[in-house]
Amino acid sequence: MRAIIADDERHLAEDLRRRITQLWPELKIIAVIHDGIAAAQALTELKPDIAFLDIRMPGQSGLDAARSASVSTRVVFVTAFDDHAVQAFDQAAADYLLKPVSDERLERCVERLQQGSLFEHDVMLSRLQKLLATPVKPEPLRWLRIQVGQTVRMVAVEEVCYFQSADKYTTVLTKDAELLLRTPLKDLIEQLDKEQFWQVHRGTVVNVKQIVSAHHDLLGKVSLSLKDRVEKVAVSRSYAHLFRQM
């Protein structure tokens, strides 16, 4: 039996080669490749019995490269999908290795290959293409790592009263501290839970759990009183509708 490994992360490709060789000494690894175009070429020219293909590779994806595989080549995709996607892989009767690859999972994969278990090549590719086309919503940011002198301070996001833009950085205001995070506010916003953190100004994002009241003055300007900060937080006209009585 002959196999190829394709993964653009060279250390992961080498680690996978080493571990497969230990589990299956009789399997001959004939090529270790680091981009999708070379993988497709190897599949066409070498016609391996087995191909371990990373999905995300430069040049072209492992999915596209797999289309060059002969019908006799069994393809094992290497993925970084979460548990929800893994269930979908199982339902598709495809084999895969989820990064980081556990010893137990790799051993099970090798056993399946040794037993000659076949999977439906076209069905597998179709299901994987659908998974790739569906955006995977990342988990909201839970912790901030903020450099303070020679120390990295860990701050739970839920403890933040509000964020204030500070040029290319962001000021993080908690109950008892003002810290400077080396991330622009516009980049940080994308990582926050939008149900809990509301943008109230171009340069301000507030923790909703901290809002005690919204004050409207005679000119129509809105300012917020917070539970754990004494200063008022200004709301721009663009976001004033968030605090109108329903």
Image (cartoon, rainbow, N blue to C red):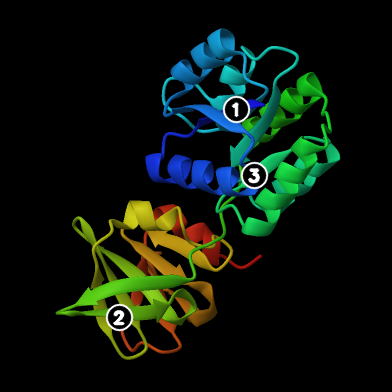
Residue 155 horizontal/vertical position (percent): 38, 79
Residues 33 and 83: in front is: 33
Label placed on residue 154: none
- The amino acid beneath tag 1 is Ala
**Residue at the disc numbered 1:** 3
Residue at x-position 39% and y-position 45%? 11
**Residue at the disc numbered 2:** 153
- Cα distance between the residues tagged 3 and 2: 35 Å
- The amino acid beneath tag 2 is Arg
User: Which residue lies most toward the left here?
Assistant: 149
Residue at x-position 61% and y-position 12%? 68
Residue 226 horizontal/vertical position (percent): 43, 83
Q: Residues within 10 Å of mark 3 (few under 14, many from 20)?
A: many
Residue at x-position 25% and y-position 81%? 178
Is 73 situated left or right of 202 in this image? right
Q: Nearer the viewer, mark 1 or mark 3?
A: 1
